[in-house]
Amino acid sequence: MKKIFIICFAAALLNTACSSSFLDIPPQSSSTEGSFFKTEDHFTQAINNTYASLRELYNDKGWSMSEMRSDNTHYTRYEAGRGYPTTDKENIADFLVAIENTYVRDMWKSCYTSISKANTVIDRIETKNFSEDFTKKTLGQAKFIRAFVYFQLVQYFGGVPLQLHEVTSAENNDLPRSSVEEVYAQIITDVKEAIDYLKPVSFPQDGSATQGAAKTLYAYVLMTKPDRDYAEAERQLLDVTKMGYDLETEFADVFDTGKKNGKEHIFSIQYQQGDQGQQSSWLYIFLPRTANADVATGVQGSNLVENSGWNVPTSETINLFSDKDKRRDVSIGIAVCNDNDMYTKIDNWFYVGDPEIANYKLALPFIRKYQHAHAKLRNMDDNWPVYRYSDVLLLLAECAVEQGKPNEANKYLNRVRERAGLEAYNGVVTADIVANERRMELAFENHRWFDLIRTGKALEVMKAYGEYIKKEDVGLPANTYNIKPGYLLYPIPFQEMERNKNLTQNEGYLK
């Protein structure tokens, strides 16, 4: 595997280590802005540093603002610890987001950090006389990243400032918000260039964007923007099916850390266990807060920290899976104990439906897609899957339904169901059937909230979910889940409104 050497820049490109499967990284050296951006190797380091910044979109902010915002998961309330990091995450789930919310603020900041790094690469490589092949490869990756991040922003916030060049002065820093349509137009311009410049996938993958990743992103954009184009999205997705991707034989293999970036992975955020600061730790975050997490993690140590007990699968979500569905045991585990306080210890964990669970006083579900062997506490090797081949198949099913071709949707839907161990669906495939299959197949991968928004079901589903979860979690305040249309977007962060007087606030939030 090619080794990527990171240099810390004096410019805004800095702040994160480089990514790999890009990920074998030696100690960092230092450089100045004046001596950097001179060679092809410099630009290779720069683009990999840009990939690395995407991790910040998929740590606490990512699952808090998407998966836990949806009807898939809730959280375990810990009454003894009520500081703002805890309540800010709870408020996202409960639709009580204030303009000062730190996770919303940090998501905005992380997105624009990645955009800034991509802009620097794009602007500076245009002045270089590098080989055409290298220039296209680098521009393709930078344009993909910029399109990908703006797609995150427009879904979270609506219209946002379109920062398309390296910031060199105050004049091109404090920009007003562009319209949603203008943001989507720019995303499409960027992603089309990425498709033209990037090459199809080759295996083994190294984690960088490919033409398949760009086409998948383009299809998502076409299916989400205000004026949908399902026919073109279908064409892009069909191209992806011809590129060599395929379903893994077993669902568990998709998440196996020994098989990262395999044939099913179209684009994943890269992490690596070790001492480089690139590790993931979602298993610990999603487990209950407990003194002996080793029962579930295999590594001696406590999980008595604020960053645990989050993104907990609800009973409603668990009950979606039939006993025959292979995805259930890969996706969800049940932690149990015989004390009245789960925070004291975990006695064991079981798969859903195990009769042994009834022998314990307390049982709490947790996400186990990321439950894999590792050597150090909260230091794991799991990548975060963004686009998978099964996702593409289910998007094709959605495109077929939206174009009045329900019979064609069956073949895509049933490929996914067959791998899950389920019988083929032979009836008329509807949008709700596809959405339900996506909910199970892609559970806990940050898709559900965006799916609800895209399909126009968010208000209906989340209002019903609010009534349900208030019965499950009787400690929820009365004003939770008072969902208004404006709450389908997050507020523009207070700190950004104070800094940039050209910004306007989203509907339903304080100015």
Image (cartoon, rainbow, N blue to C red):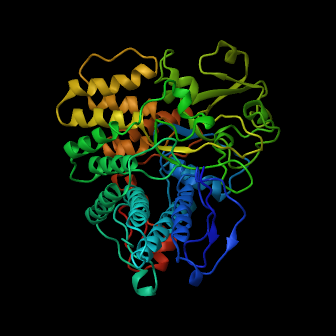
The residue lying furthest to the left in this view is 404
Report if residue 342 is visible in the image: yes
Q: Work out whether residue 75 or residue 278 is closer to the camera in this orientation and state it.
A: 278
Say whether residue 199 is left or right of residue 291: left
Q: Work out whether residue 89 or residue 164 is closer to the camera in this orientation and state it.
A: 164
Q: Residue at x 73, y 20 (%)?
A: 360
Q: Residue at x 63, y 63 (%)?
A: 5
Q: Residue at x 24, y 42 (%)?
A: 235
Q: Quadrant of residue 197?
A: bottom left
Q: Work out whether residue 224 or residue 453 is closer to the camera in this orientation and state it.
A: 224
Residue 338 percent across, percent down from the top left: 78, 24
Say whether residue 430 is left or right of residue 140: left
Compared with 432, 20 (above or below) is below
In this figure, what is the number of numbered marks? 0
Compared with 452, 408 (above or below) is above
Residue 293 percent across, percent down from the top left: 76, 36
Q: Work out whether residue 206 or residue 228 is closer to the camera in this orientation and state it.
A: 206
Compared with 429, 145 (above or below) is below
Residue 264 percent across, percent down from the top left: 46, 35
Compared with 189, 60 (above or below) is above
Q: Quadrant of residue 298?
A: top right
Q: Quadrant of the C terminus?
A: bottom left
Report if residue 491 is visible in the image: no
Residue 14 percent across, percent down from the top left: 59, 71
The residue lying furthest to the right in this view is 300
Q: Quadrant of residue 336?
A: top right
Say whether residue 183 is left or right of residue 337: left
